Amino acid sequence: MAQVGTFELAVRLGVATVAVVGPTLLFLGLWRLLLWLRDDELVKALAERGVVEAPAPSPVDVLAGASGGSECGTCGTVNVRGADVCRECFSSLE
Ligand SMILES: [Zn+2]
């Protein structure tokens, strides 16, 4: 096997780092963009007018309601019973 110089090794490590971290950052950026673009009030208004089907509650919402979970004092989100932090705003539930 041929000797690899320090510079070439640094370049290879840089390329490998970009190849590993790049797609992850792009995915997280896309996820953030989609969350930013989501308009819950618009979907709710359209569902009330019958234009679109009302979105089904998420399993976490159903579980939190059925378990008699505690309501967050900060944002009002109902959390699963026994949760330590709010699943929406991450404030402490005590
Ligand atoms: Zn909260």
Image (spheres, rainbow, N blue to C red):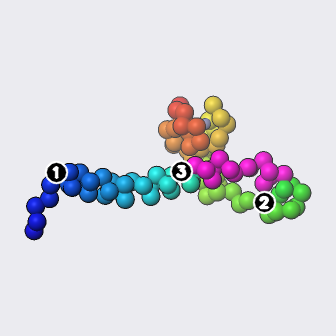
Q: Which of the labelled discs sits on residue 29, or is there none?
A: 3
Q: Identify which residue is drawn at 73% across, 49% down.
A: 39
Instruction: Tell me the quadrant of ligand 1.
Output: top right
Task: Please name the residue that numbered disc 2 is placed on.
Answer: 54
Q: Amino acid at mark 1?
A: Thr
Q: Please report contact status of discs 1 and 2: CB closer than 8 Å, yes or no.
A: no
Q: Earlier in the sequence, mark 1 or mark 3?
A: 1
Q: CA distance from mark 1 to mark 2?
A: 59 Å
Relative image position of residue 37 (x, y in whole percent): 68, 50
Sort mark 3 into few (<14), some (14-19) or many (20+) by Cα contacts within 10 Å: few
Q: Secondary structure at mark 2?
A: loop
Along the line of sight, the residue nearer the viewer: 34 or 7: 7
Does the numbered disc 1 mark a residue whose Cβ is under 8 Å from ligand 1?
Answer: no
Q: Earlier in the sequence, mark 1 or mark 2?
A: 1
Q: CA distance from mark 1 to mark 3?
A: 33 Å
Q: Main secondary structure of the magenta part?
A: helix
Query: Which residue occupies the extreme right position in the image?
Result: 49
- Image position of 20 (left or right of 12): right
Q: Which of the labelled discs sits on residue 6, or is there none?
A: 1
Q: Amino acid at mark 3?
A: Gly
Q: Nearer the viewer, mark 1 or mark 3?
A: 1
Along the line of sight, the residue nearer the viewer: 35 or 73: 35
What is the span of residues highlighted in magenta in the rendered image?
32-45
Relative image position of residue 82 (x, y in whole percent): 51, 42
Along the line of sight, the residue nearer the viewer: 30 or 63: 30
Q: CA distance from mark 3 to mark 2?
A: 27 Å
Relative image position of residue 88 (x, y in whole percent): 59, 42
Q: Nearer the viewer, mark 1 or mark 2?
A: 1
Residue 70 sits inside the magenta stretch: no
Q: Identify which residue is drawn at 84% across, 56% down.
A: 46
